[in-house]
Amino acid sequence: AQSVTQLGSHVSVSEGALVLLRCNYSSSVPPYLFWYVQYPNQGLQLLLKYTTGATLVKGINGFEAEFKKSETSFHLTKPSAHMSDAAEYFCAVTERGSYIPTFGRGTSLIVHP
Amino acid sequence: DAGVTQSPTHLIKTRGQQVTLRCSPKSGHDTVSWYQQALGQGPQFIFQYYEEEERQRGNFPDRFSGHQFPNYSSELNVNALLLGDSALYLCASSRPDSQLIDTQYFGPGTRLTVL
């Protein structure tokens, strides 16, 4: 069965600093991988996805993630944090051949002025 | 163009009661999925409806049931409520040719509290 681990329930950065949110998965074969953002009292919004091809994926709002098969990881990064990036971030995986997603527990990103 | 809408926004029930949550999909979408998001957890897939039938189901008991209407709107019903059913219930809609979650548009959710 697939699973998703997001290291760190909270990540705190200063405005302008690098953002790194970690995601590791376990799956028998390389799955489809996703990052979502959730602002307070809102639903989830897709940031980026990896399905096939280039392993470095660029998303919205300056975020990107790299699929590393050998490390079973899909970490999310952004070079310079903005105050508006403060939100809950979820990593999710879907095994190929299945359309049922598994989400991680989420990481709360806190951005200090 | 209205996105995914859900009602009610908040709901308080007591143990043993039954609850119905409602969802209207985004215009042009006819597939609806439901998720449960407990506090401090990621969303968990409950089930997906297409053409008024349950197409896929996650690991949830039969107390959780649903329905899809001809206008593609959907209801989530939970019977015999338990304290552990307290959560944010998210609805997501998509077009039938894309089942991956990246094509799903999420509503703001219904916050259910079971006392």
Image: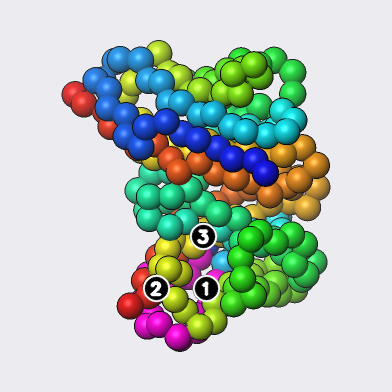
Along the viewing direction, whichever of B98 and A68 lies nearer the viewer: A68
Asked which secondary structure carries label 1, the reply is strand
User: Which numbered disc, 3 or 1, marks the residue closer to the eye?
Assistant: 3
Q: Magenta includes A111? A: no
Q: List x then y, in percent, for residue A87.
A: 36, 38
**Marks 2 and 1, the one that precedes in the sequence:** 1
Asked which secondary structure carries label 3, the reply is strand
- Residue placed under numbered mark 1 in the picture: B21
Q: Which mark is residue B36?
A: 3
- Residue placed under numbered mark 2 in the picture: B83
Along the viewing direction, whichever of B24 and B33 lies nearer the viewer: B33
Q: Residues within 10 Å of mark 1 (few under 14, many from 20)?
A: many
Q: Quadrant of residue A69?
A: top right
Vertical comparison of A30 with B90: above or below = above
Q: List x then y, in percent, for residue B66.
A: 65, 73
Q: Can you see residue B63?
A: yes
Extreme-left residue of the structure:
A113
- Callout 1: residue from which chain? B
Q: Can you see residue A46?
A: no
**The magenta segment:** B6-22
